[in-house]
Image (tube, coloured by chain):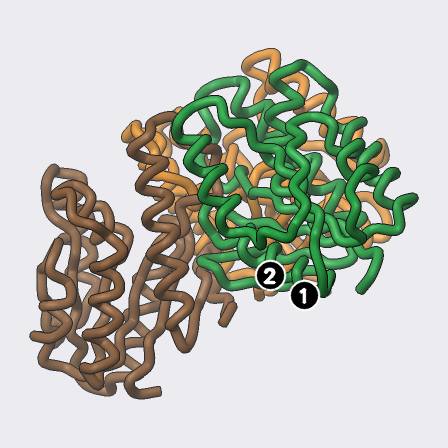
Chain colours: A brown, B orange, C green
Amino acid sequence: MSKSLILVTGGARAGKSAFAQEWAQALAGAAVSFIATAEALDEEMRNRILRHRRERPASWETLEQPLKVSTALQQARHPVVLLDCLTLWVSNLMQVEKEVLPEIENLLAVRAESNKTLLVVTNEVGLGIVPDNALARQYRDLLGAANRRIAEEADVVYLLISGVPVKIK
Amino acid sequence: MSKSLILVTGGARAGKSAFAQEWAQALAGAAVSFIATAEALDEEMRNRILRHRRERPASWETLEQPLKVSTALQQARHPVVLLDCLTLWVSNLMQVEKEVLPEIENLLAVRAESNKTLLVVTNEVGLGIVPDNALARQYRDLLGAANRRIAEEADVVYLLISGVPVKIK
Amino acid sequence: MSKSLILVTGGARAGKSAFAQEWAQALAGAAVSFIATAEALDEEMRNRILRHRRERPASWETLEQPLKVSTALQQARHPVVLLDCLTLWVSNLMQVEKEVLPEIENLLAVRAESNKTLLVVTNEVGLGIVPDNALARQYRDLLGAANRRIAEEADVVYLLISGVPVKIK
């Protein structure tokens, strides 16, 4: 399973991060490099970030990188890298008006050259009613395209439903 | 299949209740105890409740209990009990500011002691765009945690998509 | 696989149309009749329609029909017909206050008599938080009922997640 690309998707609070962390730990044996894309812009986010950090082993390397995820992947010290999550990365890129899909292609190219196993956590956000505001629709389109592109290259894709992992590729 | 815990999840209008009712009927042979968590607070809800009641066999026992679901499970006369639905129960608990997760643990403990088969209907609500309001996000988090906890203990989990049951555990 | 009814469902931007088009092309060998239900009411929709049209083979027949989909199915020149999508058709019917479910029954009857293979693309819209406005809830109910009815009659149902097809029936 070394050098694989693995996508873990599902809804919010479906157990994606916990599943990806257990899997990364099992693949790595030792420590994992964790790329965190979340930024603590308000109290709610700060609490989520702290809670998530407490759930990870203390031995893991954490790279906080809201935008330059490919650089973080190059810098990661361990052969197994967990990116959590694509959802926030796409959102962060949109906020600074960076093109999303070229960034995804770049990440895939860096990963292919890197000899590292990369687990990517993402969200499905397109299974509700069409959002009222245009920005949310644009986000939904871009994240959908990013998810499809990574799933296309992935060796394995898991969908998490109520904490139950379903292997779909 | 007696004494099992079964979770039926999926989106709104995906055929979860109909599937769970057919299954409960098949397991029970005879009558089923039905725990209804819905409250008729407005016309729309009243119509849904009446429509759902007409879809159930007249011989079934109905326990209307928006909050004390574990008590209803203890009081249920039949060995097969259908709880429809977890989604509204969590919402009702939040409205009266009761802690949700201890209630879930209590339900699981009562079920384990009860010698009854329990089918739980719930919803996936985390596969759309992040909701604008904080209460909806808090609800999404709590229901997600409740779903994961019940799925973890469940013997069988079904996901309903467009009325098609997909066994995921 | 001739004369089948096939449902392709999933979230927005999950690759449903691309998957259905590849499949229709493979089934047909030659050209496919494409029933387009989208109407270019604003710039955003016009762009989506044009982008989708460019993605289809030039040899395909396109029938633009926001409302009279059963008539379009009767008029289609080719034995393989792709309806994209049910979601917009239901929305269009609601806007002109036509009853949705009798239209679905009529489509199924016309299809059964027609000797044609019909692929239907639809969306799952019920896996997010309950929408605030009553019209969106009504739409969600009606589309859910339409999806269930077509899935019930379908020979094959695929769920698309991040572009990955999952056969669920």
Hey, which residue is sitting farthest front in the picture?
C59
In the figure, C28 relative to B145: above or below?
below
Answer above or below: position of B8 versus B93. Answer: below
**Left or right: C141, with C107 as reference point:** left
Residue type, mark 1 in image: Ala
Provide residue A33's location: percent of width, then percent of height: 15, 74
> Looking at the image, which is closer to me, A123 or B68?
A123
Residue A42's place in the image compared with C67, above or below, is below
User: Which residue bears the numbered disc 2?
Assistant: C22
Amino acid at the residue labelled 2: Glu
For mark 1, does the 10 Å Cα neighbourhood hold few (<14), some (14 to 19), or many (20 or more) residues? few
Q: Which residue is mark 1?
A: C26
Q: Quadrant of the N terminus of chain A?
A: bottom left
Instruction: Check disc 2: other Cα within 10 Å, few if <14, some if 14-19, many if 20+.
Output: few
Kindly identify the residue that appears in the image at 80 percent across and 48 percent down.
C153
Along the viewing direction, whichever of C2 and C160 lies nearer the viewer:
C2
